[in-house]
Image (cartoon, helix red, strand yellow):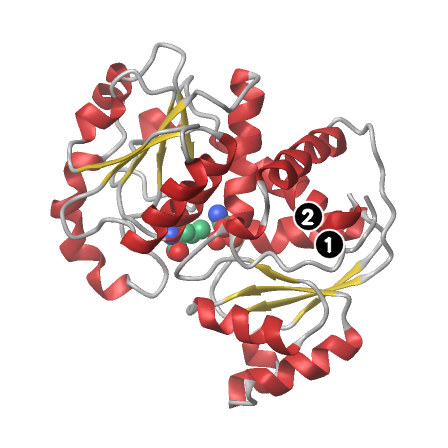
Amino acid sequence: MEALKGRDLLSLADLSAAELLFLLKFAAQLKAGEVRPSCPKTLGLLFSKASTRTRVSFSVAMHHLGGQVLDLNASVTQVGRGEPLEDTARVLDRYLDVVAIRTFAQSEVETFADYAKIPVINALTDLEHPCQILADLLTVQESFGQLEGLTLTYLGDGNNITHSLLIGCALVGINLRVATPTGYEPLPEVVTQAKALAGDRSIITLTTDPEAAAKDSQVLYTDVWASMGQEAEADNRIPVFEPYQINKKLLELAAPEAIVLHCLPAHRGEEITHEVMEGAASRIWDQAENRLHTQKAVLAGVLGAI
Ligand code: CP
Ligand code: NVA
């Protein structure tokens, strides 16, 4: 798809519905070994937060495409010593073909993209995690053979995962229920944006009632109650979020064919029980695998290899 070439992926809303569905289809073809794009280019990983899945899946994806990866951790570059992002972006733009950035403020990936001509991919910010939601949607599609018309329930903190889920579900026509404690709702501007994108295709509901949200839902999804950067609040959040745990009792309220997703890393016994993570409804390991296939599709797309 020529239209993806050279593009940034800073928010899932940077993709049209057709582009998102095309990437999912291409990722499924990559997974099945039906297509083998070649892309001998260089990806830079500029991560200032920890990562297992995103770091490794991007690296392996680029390796499979015939390219190479440079780990540009802030502590081993001048970024860690305060070199301005605007300068770093203009210099790395001259060496790299694509960059994936994991950081705190969304404004940092936006600034980098403003100063670099190469494609910039958001590998997680406090606001969004678009690459994760591409893998999640592929996993849902694999389980149900469709996306439009399904109901997905997200339980827990209204965080970066929630924001990208709001946009992703709106684009593909999944009905989304978000159940959070009062005061932990997703940002109202992202909810408004998602509702505008969804139009009449799907319904987006916010609630504080986890049981009502889980009832007859086909997908239950959760994430940690305290994200990276919120460690100091983690203990205080546990009693507030306890009613939102995905456990056997909550899963019994969902549709009989319901699946369970978690972006990982998980805190067993907090947002999800060990029993549910390891149970028959869990698609968590397929979901983690799908990071590789969907990010390979994104890389091939923005590098013009599709
Ligand atoms: N889900 C996810 O992004 O995992 P990592 O933080 O390990 O990359
Ligand atoms: N919300 C979590 C997601 C981790 C993949 C965080 O930002 O830490």
Q: Are marks 2 and 1 in contact (CB under 8 Å)?
A: yes
Where, by quadrant of the figure, is residue 208 drawn? Answer: top left
* Residue lying at 74% horizontally and 60% vertically, measured from the top left: 6
Asked whether residue 187 appears in the rendered view, the answer is: no
Residue holding disc 2: 298
Q: Residue 197, image x and y in percent? A: 45, 41
Q: Amino acid at mark 1?
A: Val
Q: Amino acid at mark 2?
A: Val
- In the image, residue 162 sits, relative to residue 106, either above or below, namely above
Q: Nearer the viewer, residue 83 or 13?
A: 13
| Quarter of the figure that contains the N terminus | top right
- In the image, residue 272 sits, relative to residue 5, either above or below, namely above
* Residue lying at 34% horizontally and 29% vertically, measured from the top left: 203
Residue holding disc 1: 302
Q: Residues within 10 Å of mark 2 (few under 14, many from 20)?
A: many
* Residue lying at 83% horizontally and 48% vertically, measured from the top left: 305
Q: Secondary structure at mark 1?
A: helix
Query: 251 left or right of 95?
Result: left
Q: Residue 54, image x and y in percent? A: 57, 52
